[in-house]
Amino acid sequence: MEMVLQIFLLAAGFTMLIKGADFFVDGSSGIASRFGIPQLVVGLTIVAMGTSAPEAAVSISAALKGNAGITIGNVAGSNILNILIILGFTAFLTKKIVPVAASTIKYEMPFMIAIIFILLWMGYTGNEIARLEGAGLWVVFLLYLFYLLKMAQKGAGRNPEDGEGEISGGDKKEKSMAMLCLFTAAGLALIVIGSSVTVDAATAIARIIGLSERFIGLTIVALGTSLPELFTSVSAARKGSADIAIGNIVGSNIFNILFVVGTSALITPVVFESKFIVDFIVAVAAGVLLWIFSFRGKSLNRVEGGLLLLGYLGYFIYLL
């Protein structure tokens, strides 16, 4: 009986995520169009931080409860899933190639890889992320926000060839600003609630089946907290807002490292167990692979999406 209930809750969570992603992409891209904000900036900020809310909630709540060790597993698993599964599915399921903005290839992707490596180095040398290191991550996060602000100020007149053109769809222009804000807020609420319901149901099902706690943390919980990024990115790519799709993932990974780990470490030192070293090496490798694919063709195609998915399959087999 309990299994049936959890399957029902899992289906309900997926439904909320699907509808929430649609509303959120429509609302946020519509607002961006009204103000002339590049889609890439929206993806790297509003969408990225909004869809990373589950990771932030889980990790910060764990730190407040004195269980900050879960932070590292959640962030490592989510960052790997974001690249290998979410961008893999986004590129594989989208009929057209998914273009990648020039600035994302030149700046944001290398920055993402660098901060993942820095977090790995912090954990490897000290076996924890100390409060001082958490403060350092927050300083870098503030500098990153400043960079995004400058990019937004310069971006209103960018060339569409850079992957930041106007968002098509007359229905978005007909909606009032109040309606667009309502769509964005309602979508975000559905995404966060749907993610929570899905994580709880998937975890309960996994425990009934008898899977280990570490396996649940690095896969099911990480996938659950990354579901907002999955549905938002696929929905954005299908609607022609590719920069939101790519920016969402890159921005979410940056947000997970700098804000989520930084804030958790400020609350209490975050334990970095040696078993997570391999996971972060995989996260760095996934970022490098994504950068190579993007650099070669300024886009992601179905073949590259399939290779990203195969990369996760190999990691999943390692976990088993």
Image (cartoon, rainbow, N blue to C red):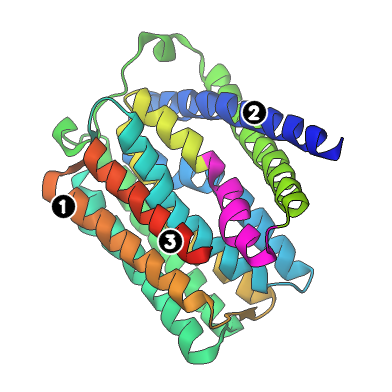
Q: Residues within 10 Å of mark 3 (few under 14, many from 20)?
A: some
Q: CA distance from mark 3 to mark 2?
A: 29 Å
- Inspect this view and state whether residue 283 appears: yes
Quickly name the residue at label 3. Answer: 315
Between 143 and 220, the residue placed more toward the observer is 220
Residues marked 3 and 2 touching at CB (< 8 Å): no
Q: Position of residue 107 (x, y in %)?
A: 25, 58
The kind of residue tagged 2 is Met
The kind of residue tagged 3 is Tyr
Q: Position of residue 218 (x, y in %)?
A: 57, 61
Looking at the image, tell me whether mark 1 or mark 2 is earlier in sequence order: 2
Between 85 and 287, the residue placed more toward the observer is 85
Looking at the image, tell me whether mark 3 or mark 2 is earlier in sequence order: 2
Question: Seen in the image, is 123 located left or right of residue 74?
Answer: left
Question: Seen in the image, is 47 located left or right of residue 289?
Answer: right
| Span of residues in magenta | 211-228
Quickly name the residue at label 1. Answer: 295
Q: CA distance from mark 1 to mark 2?
A: 35 Å
Q: Would you identify the image quadrant in which residue 10 lies?
A: top right
Question: Seen in the image, is 239 located left or right of residue 229?
Answer: left
Depicted 312 relative to depicted 304: above or below: below
Q: Quadrant of the N terminus?
A: top right
The kind of residue tagged 1 is Phe
Residue in view at x 65 percent, y 81 percent: 269
Depicted 226 relative to depicted 56: above or below: above
Q: Position of residue 160 (x, y in %)?
A: 18, 31
Quickly name the residue at label 2. Answer: 16
Depicted 16 relative to depicted 91: above or below: above
Q: Would you identify the image quadrant in which residue 92 lies?
A: top left
Task: Describe the element under mark 3 as helix, strand or loop.
Answer: helix
